[in-house]
Image (cartoon, grey):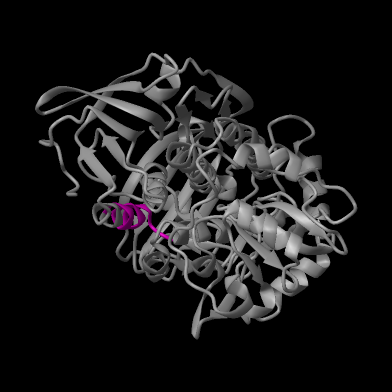
Amino acid sequence: MCETCTTAPAVASVPVVIVGAGPVGVTAALLLARRGVRSIVLERHRDVYPLPRALVVDDEVRRILQAAGVGEAFAAMARTGNGLRLLDARHRVMAEFRRSKHGPHGYPQTSMFEQPALERLLRDTLARHPECELRSGAEVTGIGPDTGGPVRVTYRDDDGEHQLWAEAVLGCDGANSLTRQAIGAAWEDLRFEERWTVIDVRTTADVRCWEGVDQVCDPDRPATFMRVGEDRYRWEFRLRDGQQPVRELVAPWLPPSYDGDFEVVREREYTFRARTADRWRSGRVFLLGDAAHLMPPFIGQGLCSGLRDAYNLAWKLARVLRQGGDERLLDTYESERKPHARHVIRLAVLMGWAMTGGQDGAAALRRRLLAVACRIPGLTEAAGRDLSPALTAGPLVGRRTRRGSRLVGTHCPQPWVDADGRRARLDEVLGDSFAVLTAADPSPSLNALVQGLGVRAVPVAALNDDGTLAAWLRRGRADAVLVRPDRVVMDVVPAGGRGFTGAAAWAPVLCTARGPVEETASAPLSGSAAR
């Protein structure tokens, strides 16, 4: 489908309507398409916003982009970042939060990119999927009301008013979300609000840069700096009375007395806020991305959190719409994602306070304590891991106890594997559905359960990886794990155990009258792995 389908006739009904064609909305459409779910994406703008906004993603989000079918193409436009540094007011390094070039998800833990390039890649990919249709220049004017059945969506384009009936609506329409208003959700204020100016510059100057993000922890002039592209840089400064000219603000990063090319591509004021919607769902209407949560940009997790929303919801919604999955699956979207979003927001707020130091009498003491804490061995590494803690217990995540369930709620790593004579990333072999990874050939009882679920049991030895998977199972004291489509471990067979520990909770939600889980887009495996 073409990107500017403004003359397409209105469709009476469609499985999913997605409001907003930013990265979150288009990624959700692609993830649904891989599971055979049709969608129409409505976007009021006719083209992508041409200037960078989000600039950083982590390795978990790189894995999500892989699942959406754009992993290799994104790799061609991304640069590996070193991580995050905290600088004092004189730009001396207080702490480095270094990120590995080989994270557990199979990608660098920090990747730098330009958002317009990502958005064009996503839209170009969407255009090749017959299950997706993007209607640009289409402004949504109404959603609902929620009657327990199909949801009515009205929108306006050059041809007038149109109406769609959808089995589900995904509100990916940003901070001023009409979808959020339609379901009556309100913001919960997490107590951070500051006005900043964002400055994008193009220059060939030898700018001081460490190929990561610098946060200047100066209460008088807190700032953020990073390289965006080959000759593009971004500075962010907290606003104050008597704002200095741009050249004076960025002078510490430029060569002394530099008078060469220096083009300010954009200078814009933003208000950084920390908020989450009090509810993310009403019936079959859902909030994702900035419609559901807002966070200061200091740890680069705004877009990452939105893409995690899409990944978490897409497989559950597809299972309900196409396989008769229990409606309780959809309840787990908010119960799993909202606590994680709040956790990341609080980390971002904490980083904001570390940068600004606040404006009270204890500010200097807090900065000194921060400098001391950052020198504690292992602290910065632990802070990096804290961006994606284990999911909280629920119908699709068992409780973490001492015996054999420390892996539950965490992500399965993604090493390179060899299967049927080809080298591939693990997810490319497992496909888009559930999978069981075992430390040895599955027992007859485990095989019976696996066949009932309609998934395959894969002995990790048959994957010929570098030992990552076997070591991971061993550390987790597990003989087998049940991995969800979003690569979260749902349940484990403890070492020496006979079966999954939490089947009584998840089996009624997953096993429906329509039959077992469908396999999609997966590669065959030979030998014992094919059983």
State whether residue 426 appears in this view: yes
Residue 345 visible from this viewpoint? no
Residue at image position (51%, 31%) is 292
Residue under the point 40% across and 26% down? 177
Q: Position of residue 136 (x, y in %)?
A: 21, 38
State left or right for residue 8 relative to residue 180: left
Which quadrant of the figure contains the C terminus? bottom right
Expressed as whole percent of the image width and height from the top left, the position of residue 383 reads 73, 54
* Residue 160 at x, y percent in the picture: 12, 22
Q: Is residue 115 above or below residue 272?
A: below
Task: Write the residue at 45% across / 22% down.
Answer: 180
Q: Residue furthest right?
A: 402
Please provide the residue range marked out in magenta: 113-123
Name the magenta segment's main secondary structure: helix
Name above or below for residue 502 compared with residue 61. Answer: above
In the rendered image, residue 300 lying in the magenta stretch gets the answer no
Report how many numbered discs are placed on residues in the image: 0
Query: In the shown orientation, is residue 388 left or right of residue 497?
Result: left
- Dividing the picture into quarters, in which one does residue 419 lie? bottom right
Residue 18 rendering spot, x and y as whole percentages: 35, 35
Q: Is residue 48 left or right of residue 391?
A: left
Q: Name the one closer to the observer, 264 or 324.
A: 324
- Tell me where residue 46 sits by quadrant: top left
Is 526 in front, or is 310? 526
Q: Residue at the spot x=50%, y=46% of the render? A: 315
Q: Nearer the viewer, residue 90 or 287?
A: 287
